[in-house]
Image (spheres, rainbow, N blue to C red):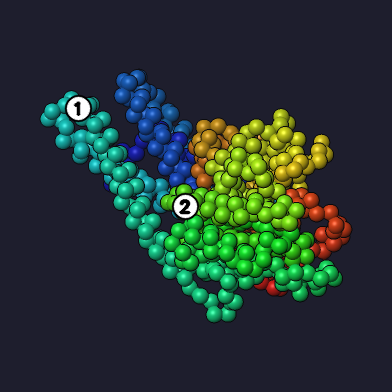
Amino acid sequence: MRNFFRSIGGFGLILGVLFFAASLTPSLIPRNQVVQGMLSGFAFGAGYGIGVVLRSVYRYLELPGLSSGSLRVVRPVAIVACLGLITTALYHVKTWQNSIRSVMNMEPLETGYPLSVSVIAIICFAILLLISRGLILFGKMLAGKFYQRFPRRVSLVAGVVLAVFLIITLTNGVLVEYTFRALDRSFQQYDALLEPDRPQPLIAERAGREFVASGPTAADITAFTGQNALEPIRLYAGLQVADSPMERARLLLDELIRVKAFDRSTLVIITPTGTGWVDPSAMDGLEYLLHGDVASVALQYSYLNSPMSLVFQPESGLESAQALFRTVYDYWKELPASQRPELYLHGLSLGAFNSQRSFTFLDILGDPINGAVWSGPPFPSELWRSLTNNREAGSTEWLPVFEDGRFVRFMNQDGMPNAKDVPWGDLRFVYLQYASDAITFFEKGLLYQEADWMKKPRGPDVSPLLKWYPVVSMLQILIDMPLSDTVPMGYGHVYAPGHYLNAWIEVTGIDSWLPEQIDALKVLLLKKSEGGEGYESRGG
């Protein structure tokens, strides 16, 4: 144990402390003591690892170090400074976390749990250190095999390269594949569970039942508006109804034709999230706005949640989204233009990611669709990224303006920028996004540079105390991603029905509702989404 502690690098510890302190500062999503402790432990480990590598390179170059006399002075000063920094950072944790909770209208914390955070961080760092030491020993063992035939340093490099190669191969080729298959089987079994108290949709598996079975009925819409309404059409096909995405899409087309969905005024093609979940509140407002004269259709492509689908099955969602769009669009475009419904696209999160990729503008050049509402587009979205990067000068990354907003507009909790008040063109695409959504605004560049959305002016739901730190900020936002749906509705990755309603009003151009009617509808939708009446609240 004595040798183990003596082997811990001092420069690595200093960088580790700096990273630890930075990890306690606010990011996009509030963190409890367990998550904060794990994040701080990883941050400490990252700083320590970088420090050890830099120190090793310094020694390898045979550069002069501090004398023993200098070390006797520097070492205690460094220890006192590190302890002071850790104490100060832990003292401010509560204030930093409350700065996030405040902009999200959450109850403030009474304590920052400094002891719990520290203990968890130490445990995480110790585990990371042991794993790293084990991998280093494995590399040295491999290097020893080369010593008899090659120079020492060549053998060392060869051993490290071989060890890294074997570890990556084992992880990707065996561990990841086994994990994927196990998760896929477990989610498939979960997906197949049936709830006896829920009505069964026309063609759907478990993941689609909430979407199909919920939502307002014609009677609900009539009761609210005082006008006669149609029964909204919602169709959904699960993975088990056919073997291939194209076969499932054709089944859905047959159902659309059978229930006369193409006779409605509006048709929405929905790409679900990874689990196949469709947010019911995304469609509820539109069904009220159109008095039920709308049909929507969705097709499941995975059992896994969105992050897992993006990692393990990156192309499965695209294949499914393209199959459904192409099948429905090819039939729709052959109908007389004066008699066919307006055609829109919708997707949330990974659904938005794949919905954007389900078509190209060359595909629809002859018969363009009417528009789309894409909410919470994840950071890899190519179209979203291109539009954001080419925004007008002076507009922000979290609410950009592109080409005066004639065809594409971005919207958040407060609406969209209308400074130039440019009328819509023939196509209307709206991105609904919150500045606090880490799934949208994560980027690898945070490793070494500050993101534009971190600069002032910031989004209304971003902590004013947030600051960028190399490496640490990337770790913070990475941890924020799976936590983005744990915050109140209207923040992070939890999109509010009232904001969906605003987006659909913009996309469809509906202007027959009075402002007070819209406000009353938002109140009703909020009650339903919170489970106060009607169907279940958000989940999945």
**Residue at point 42%, 28% (across, down):** 73
Residue situated in front as seen by the camera: 273 or 8: 273
- Kindly report the distance in space between the C-alpha atoms of the residues bearing marks 1 and 2: 47 Å
Q: Is residue 196 left or right of residue 213?
A: left
Residue situated in front as seen by the camera: 26 or 371: 371
- Where does the image place residue 490, in percent across and percent down from the top left? 69, 55
- Where does the image place residue 23, in percent across and percent down from the top left? 53, 43
The answer, for residue 503, to whether it is visible in the render is no
The answer, for residue 149, to whether it is visible in the render is yes
Q: Is residue 143 left or right of residue 165?
A: left
Q: Determine which residue is flagged by label 1.
A: 152
Of labels 1 and 2, the one closer to you: 2
- Where does the image place residue 15, in percent across and percent down from the top left? 45, 35
**Amino acid on which the number 1 mark rests in the picture:** Arg
In terms of secondary structure, where does tag 2 sit?
helix
| Residue 531, quarter of the rendered image | bottom right
| Residue 257, quarter of the rendered image | bottom right
Mark 2 closeness class: few <14, some 14–19, many ≥20 residues within 10 Å: some
| Relative height, residue 514 to residue 462 (above, below) | below
Question: The C terminus lies in which quarter of the figure?
Answer: bottom right
Residue situated in front as seen by the camera: 14 or 72: 14
- Where does the image place residue 394, in percent across and percent down from the top left? 73, 31
Q: Residue furthest left?
A: 148
Q: Earlier in the sequence, mark 1 or mark 2?
A: 1
**Residue at point 41%, 33% (across, down):** 51
Mark 1 closeness class: few <14, some 14–19, many ≥20 residues within 10 Å: some
**Amino acid on which the number 2 mark rests in the picture:** Ser
Question: Which numbered tag is attached to residue 316?
Answer: 2
